[in-house]
Amino acid sequence: MSAVGFHLHLLVFFACISSSAIYGQKRGFIGLQDSDSDSVYVDSVTASTLKSGLTTVFFAVVYIFVFAVGFPSNAIAIWVFVFRSKKIHPSTIYMANLALADLLFVIWIPLKIAYHVNGNNWTFGEEMCKVMVSFFYGNMYCSILFITCLSVQRYWVVAHPLTQQRTNNKLAIVVSISIWAFICISTTPLFLYQQTAELSGLNITTCHDVNIISKANMENQSTFLDIQKPFYYFMVMAGLGFFIPCVIIITAYVMMMRKLGQSTVDKSSASKNRHRAFVLIATVLVTFLVCFIPSNVMLVVHYTLLGRGIANSGYGFYITTLCLASLNSCLDPFLYYFVSEEFRSHVKNTFLCRSSRTVERMRVSFSSLKYSKKSNTYTTGTSHTDSSTL
């Protein structure tokens, strides 16, 4: 079975588990709030999950890995894009913004690590919880949108190889600003409802892990009144921030591969373009299969079930997919490194502590000596071809 088929079967399996709870107990991974006090109570299944090694150990390990890999890799990427890239292309603009989005999220991860290591006890206050949650989902949808831009840009380069890419920089800047404006606006609803829950039985305060539902609404089967804000938010974002970009990405890749198949350029150049295209598609596919598809599917399933007051027996899988979604901050640098020759060259020179002036001198020195197969001699030359980008 292929990796794609395995992940799809896994998603269907867990979705079916969640849906089967319709005939079970009318409880979900929720906190019931007593109308006479602010106390929030959870059932034994919820309590055991919050105490389990899944949330207190595994999640902490994942976030430590994300921080250890994502922070330096994205910081280096921004350094390369801002200070080492001589010629700015639209793809460079999109990649720099993607790295910035990842870095802005990664710097908040130490709070998540402390939260899980401390037994899922949030000690930083309601406002800080809202900020961290907004950066988490902001990074997710920001990454999806910029990956979409990169995919469309890559198709445009393949379909129109003679187009002067520099003329598209203004468009790339406008698109990038629009995406950031959309993310800032779209994360605002996350500040409009409570994200923390003080659990009386466990003596901990959770952050974005327990949805509070009043006891009165539960008894009246009106649970939707308590979760309507996150319900509408995640349904809209699943459509605008996930489904539509997925359709655009798939369309761009199909058109790109078709264009490469019809290419009339020499075989070596065509083979090189196909290789880059396959690497780009594989990297994006892995990112979506691990980070974006499971989390967005389970977000829709989870809040749909909560809205009906139905237990989500697949909640363990749901919160795991949200944790794994943070891995996109580690996978995105592979997108820059394996697809862009220019980026690889700049990273190598950065680690070797070569200045831009030294690199330029080396390039001139090597380009002045070219071996001629016909005359078996070395000839001088000054022409060169710019490294291709996404």
Image (tube, rainbow, N blue to C red):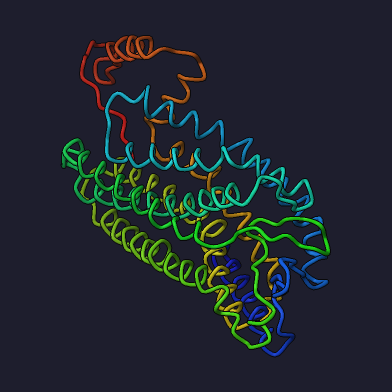
Choose between 154 and 374: the one closer to the eye.
154
Q: Is residue 380 above or below residue 28?
A: above
Q: Which residue lies furthest to the front in this view?
A: 36
Q: Quadrant of residue 199?
A: bottom right
Quadrant where the image shows the C terminus: top left
Q: Position of residue 165 (x, y in %)?
A: 20, 39
Q: Is residue 52 above or below residue 34?
A: above
Choose between 92 and 173: the one closer to the eye.
173
Q: In this view, does 268 lie to the left or right of 59?
A: left
Q: In which quarter of the image is residue 291?
A: bottom right
Choose between 272 and 54: the one closer to the eye.
54
Q: Position of residue 25 (x, y in %)?
A: 74, 85
Q: Position of residue 289 (x, y in %)?
A: 54, 60
Quadrant where the image shows the N terminus: bottom right
Choose between 309 and 323: the one closer to the eye.
309
Query: Residue at 56% across / 40% down in the picture?
Result: 106
Query: Residue at 43% across / 26% down in the picture?
Result: 79
Q: Is residue 224 left or right of residue 43?
A: left
**In the rendered picture of this protein, how many numbered marks are placed on residues?**
0
Query: Residue at 69% across / 71% down in the picture?
Result: 30
Q: In this view, does 342 lie above or below 301?
A: above
Q: Residue furthest bottom?
A: 23
Q: Position of residue 345 (x, y in %)?
A: 42, 25
Query: Residue at 62% across / 60% down in the picture?
Result: 321
